[in-house]
Image: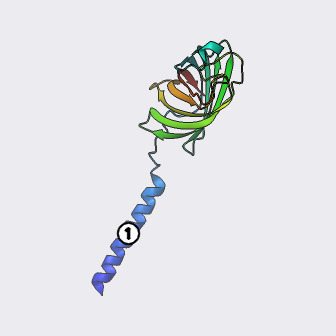
Amino acid sequence: MKNLTNLSKILLGLTALGCVSAIAVPSANAQPAYGSYLGAGASFGFTSGNSAAGESSRTSGLIAARYKFLEFPVSIRTQILIGNSTAVVPTVSFDVPLNFDTDVYIGAGVSLSNTVDTTPVGNKNSFVVQPGIDYTVPNSNLVLFGNVIFAFDAYRNSPGTSATSLQTGLGLRF
């Protein structure tokens, strides 16, 4: 009986120690690519639609924004591709941390590019999938970002033709 009492005291002590350490020591969860950012860069279209109808691939300037929900691995992203025509690509992404400075993500959204001239993501509103990566430069507020946009059925004169573009740039965290 005495051994059972001593064992109970040891288990109670270990439980109390575990509770105190859980309360006293903050969690060491890293927030990769911590925070939101606003950035600029370039967008490179890799695909063309109907070339006879003027649906050739394009390169354009890029304005990118990311709003990071700190408690959840979710971000809202918007990319504005500015060239001969403009496309706006809002997406919601699921972020996966690789380390403290880097995360990869997969997003889904729409390409709003209902224009006559093509953009890197076509010239028709379409559904998009957007895999990418964010890298926070250590000891700074700078973020290097890159992603690919796959826009499905993205060309007005080429039914069923998808557009693929690469975006890259530099952002400033806020």
The one nearer the camera, 124 or 161, is: 161
Identity of the residue drawn at 44% across and 51% down = 25
Indicate the quadrant containing the N terminus: top left, top right, bottom left or bottom right: bottom left
- Residue 82 in the image, given as x and y percentages of width and height: 65, 16
Q: Does residue 54 show up?
A: no
Q: Position of residue 129 (x, y in %)?
A: 56, 35
Q: How many marks?
A: 1
Q: How many residues crowd around disc 1 within 10 Å: few (fewer than 14), some, or many (20 or more)?
A: few
Residue at left offset 46%, top offset 48%? 27
Relative to 72, residue 12 above or below: below
* Depicted 16 relative to depicted 28: above or below: below
The amino acid beneath tag 1 is: Gly
Q: Is residue 149 visible?
A: yes
Residue 63 horizontal/vertical position (percent): 62, 20
The quarter of the picture where residue 84 lies is: top right
Task: Report which residue position mark 1 lands on.
Answer: 13
